[in-house]
Image (spheres, grey):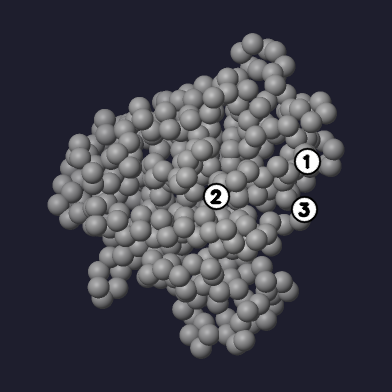
Amino acid sequence: MVPSLRKAFNDAFTPEKYEVFLKALHAQFPDAIDFRVAETPVFVPRSFAAQMTDACEYIIDVILDPAFRERTERAIPDGDRVANENGHPHFLAFDFGVCVDESGYHPQLIELQGFASLYGFQVLYPEILRQHFDIPADYSQFLSGLDKASYVRELKATIVGDLPVEQVILLELRPHQQKTRIDFYATQEYLGIQVVDLLELIQEGRQLFYMHPVTGEKTLIKRIYNRVIFDELNAAGLTPGSYVDIRADLDVEWVAHPNWFYRISKFLLPYLHHPCVPHSFFVNELKQPPADLENYVLKPLFSFAGQGVVIDVTADDLEKIKDPENWILQRKVTYADLIPTPDIPAKVELRLLYLWKDGDARPTLAINLARLSKGKMIGVRYNKDKEWVGGSVGFFER
């Protein structure tokens, strides 16, 4: 999207420089990066960023609508509803495909979530990237005028608030086995909070505790930075009673509350009407399938990381669905062959990440990540044995 910067980066790139960069990146937290890091960042001009932020602000207006809570009640599965929901999500993530048509490049919303993302790693990784590649000073991964210091302050204010750091934890199921564990460790480094396994929580009445790894003391938990996804928890095959039921009425604050994972998700797509949002609708509201069904993607509402998505939809696929109210059809978009690489061009998704501190009327656009793909979808299983694909970052024009 910025041809001069793209040409300069590609001309200066060598596999040897990339390997040296990867070695430096992995050295920060050895054996913690369990996904492919792409060879290149994405350079994003102001005009393209403005289109994405316009769509995001429109969606935030929808979330702030007084009717939003009632409209999205059905989005929360009864078995996964968590007590003590708060007034807003602390995190918003909007995934845009960089698409192309006869008018040129434009963003199209692919997914959205009211759940945390790589808010820590996307500070660390671009910083190392700059040490090994020539990135213009007037391009940054930080948004809304933030820099590293002010971003970390905003992140800490959102997650920790005014509590002692020892009373705030990052909670995940088996965190040290997760593919995103590098983000947990980076977050711990920046904020000083501890990473705690759900299986190691201690419950006493309505209170939760953990054994602090440094002091060795049983420590009260007042706030949970939640990274537990119930889809994964429910599939883990754990025996009921063998772990603390975090759905219960507990004396803790949530950042973000787990119910927002469902409220702000694919469930919201059919309610959005914006030029950057592909037309979507619930399958149970279909009177008859679209005549051009091949131009739609079929998505289950309650799945994670692309599980269950049908790309090449047929009428037979629709007839097999037993719970059509829990599926949507979303119009396909055409990803741009955006980034020239040594073989075929790579496609790009950009994720804009917001922070929503307690007390703020609206969230703040803070940072971003990018993902490069050469497969039918963004994701590891669609890009095996390919290069110039994987996790990346957008450097946005200031």
In terms of depth relative to the viewer, which is nearer, 386 or 263?
A: 263
Q: Who's the residue at 54% across and 28% down the image? A: 160
Q: Who's the residue at 29% across and 73% down the image? A: 101
Whole-percent x and y of residue 387? 36, 51
User: What label does residue 248 carry, if any?
Assistant: 1
**Do we see residue 32 in this rendering?**
no
- Which amino acid, mark 1? Ala
**Do we see residue 91 in this rendering?**
yes
User: What label does residue 114 carry, if any?
Assistant: 2
Q: Compare marks 2 and 1 and give the one earlier in the sequence.
A: 2
Judge whether 102 appears above or below 31 on screen. below
Judge whether 144 appears above or below 51 on screen. above
Q: Compare marks 3 and 1 and give the one earlier in the sequence.
A: 3
**Residue at image mark 3:** 79
User: What label does residue 295 carry, if any?
Assistant: none
- Which amino acid, mark 2? Gly
Mark 2 → mark 3, Cα distance in angstroms:
19 Å
Q: Who's the residue at 81% across and 26% down the image? A: 204
Judge whether 31 appears above or below 230 on screen. above
Whole-percent x and y of residue 312? 52, 75
Mark 2 → mark 1, Cα distance in angstroms:
20 Å
Circle 1 Cα neighbour tier, 10 Å, few/some/many (<14 / 14–19 / ≥20) = few
Quadrant of residue 226 within the rendered picture: top right
Give the number of the mark in front: 3 or 1: 1
- Which amino acid, mark 3? Gly
Whole-percent x and y of residue 189? 48, 24
Q: What element carries label 3?
A: helix
Circle 3 Cα neighbour tier, 10 Å, few/some/many (<14 / 14–19 / ≥20) = few
